[in-house]
Image (cartoon, rainbow, N blue to C red):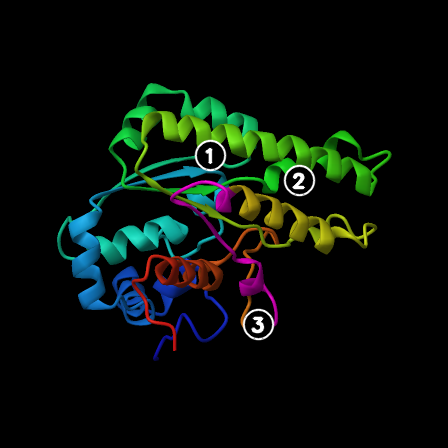
Amino acid sequence: MQFHPFHQAKIKQKEMLEIGADMETVKIDLAAEAEIDAERFKEFQKKYSRIAAIGDSLTQGVGDESGYGGHIGMLNHLFNEGEKRIHFDTFAKRGTRSEQLIQLLEKEEAKRAIEQADIVFITIGANDIMQVAKENFMNLTLQEFLDARHRFEKQIEKIITIIRSYSEDAQIYFLGFYNPFGVYFHDIKEIETIVQGWNQAVKKIADSHDDTYFIPIADLFQGQNAPLYAEDHFHPNYNSYVNITNRILQYLHLKRVD
C-alpha cells in the first residue's frame, strides 16, 4: 500500500502502524513536501542558530497526529535532519492566554532562551477569544469581543516590550488566527469579522515594530478539500500544520513561491 499523508485524509497513528506505515515513512514524506531551498538554507544557517517558540496549543502542536509536534516540531526536523544545526527552545501550554504568556516570559528559563534566540515564534490569542465567550455566555455581544481585543492589543505590545528587553536583535514572528469558532459561536454571525479584526490588530502592531512580523494563516483553512482539523474540530491536524510550516518557510525565505 502506498501512503500519501499530504494528499488524502489522515489516518490515525495507531492505524498507520497497523498497515505498516511507520513514523520514518512520514518523516520522508515531510521532507519531500516541505522541501527547503538548499542554497537559501546555507545562508540562513550563517545568520541563525537558535530559535525560541512560545505560546499556546498551536506552538505545542496539539492536534498533530503524526507525532512531530506541529509546525515547531516540523521545523525542528527539517532544519536538523541528520545533524544538529539549529537549536530550538519551546515554551507552550494548551489554553494559554496573552496575560499568561506574559507570566511565562517572566520566568528565568524563558528569558535565557530568548536572550540567546535569533528568532522568536509566537502563537497567542485564540484562548483570549474563547475566554470572552466563557465570561459572557449569558449575554454575548459583538462589543464584548471589541473590548477584549483592545485589551489584547495592549498585551501584545507588552509581550513585544518584554522580548525586546531580553533581545534587541531577535526577529519576532506572530502567527495569525484561523477561524474554528463557528461551531462554538454559531449564533454570532460576525465571528469571521471578529477573527479578521484580531488578525489585523496584531499585524498593525507587528508592522509598527522593527524586526517584528505577522504571518497570516487564516487562508490556509479556507477552500481546501483535505480535512484540516483534528478530531476536536478546533485544532489543526497534520495537513494544516504542514501548510503552516510551509507558510513559515516562505516568510523565512527558505521556500520559493511559484
Q: Could you say whether the residue bearing mark 2 is in a helix, strand or loop? A: helix
Q: In the displayed structure, would residue 7 be above or below residue 254?
A: below
Q: Which mark is residue 165?
A: none
User: For the residue marked with disc 1, what is the amino acid?
Assistant: Lys
Looking at the image, which residue is at 81% across and 55% down? 189
The span picked out in magenta is 206-225
Q: Which mark is residue 224?
A: 3
Residue with the most extreme right position: 139
Q: In the displayed structure, would residue 118 be above or below residue 182?
A: above
Q: Could you say whether the residue bearing mark 3 is in a helix, strand or loop? A: loop
In front: mark 3 or mark 2?
A: 2
In front: mark 1 or mark 2?
A: 2
Please rate how many residues cluster around mark 3, counting C-alpha atoms within 10 Å: few if below 14, some from 14 to 19, many from 20. Answer: few
From the viewer's perspective, is 104 left or right of 216?
left
User: For the residue marked with disc 3, what is the amino acid?
Assistant: Gln
The spot of residue 229 in percent (x, y) is 56, 59
Instruction: Quarter of the image for the C terminus: give it.
Output: bottom left
Q: Which of the marked residues, 1 or 3, is nearer the chain's N terminus?
A: 1
The spot of residue 69 in percent (x, y) is 38, 49
Is 83 within the magenta? no
Q: Which of the marked residues, 3 or 2, is nearer the chain's N terminus?
A: 2
Relative depth, front residue between 40 and 220: 40
Looking at the image, which residue is at 73% across and 54% down? 193
**Residue at numbered disc 1:** 93
Looking at the image, which residue is at 43% across and 55% down? 65
Residue 3 seen in render: yes
**Residue at numbered disc 2:** 129
Q: Which of the marked residues, 1 or 2, is nearer the chain's N terminus?
A: 1
The spot of residue 128 in percent (x, y) is 63, 36
User: For the residue marked with disc 2, what is the amino acid?
Assistant: Ile
Contact between labelled residues 3 and 1, with CB atoms less than 8 Å apart: no
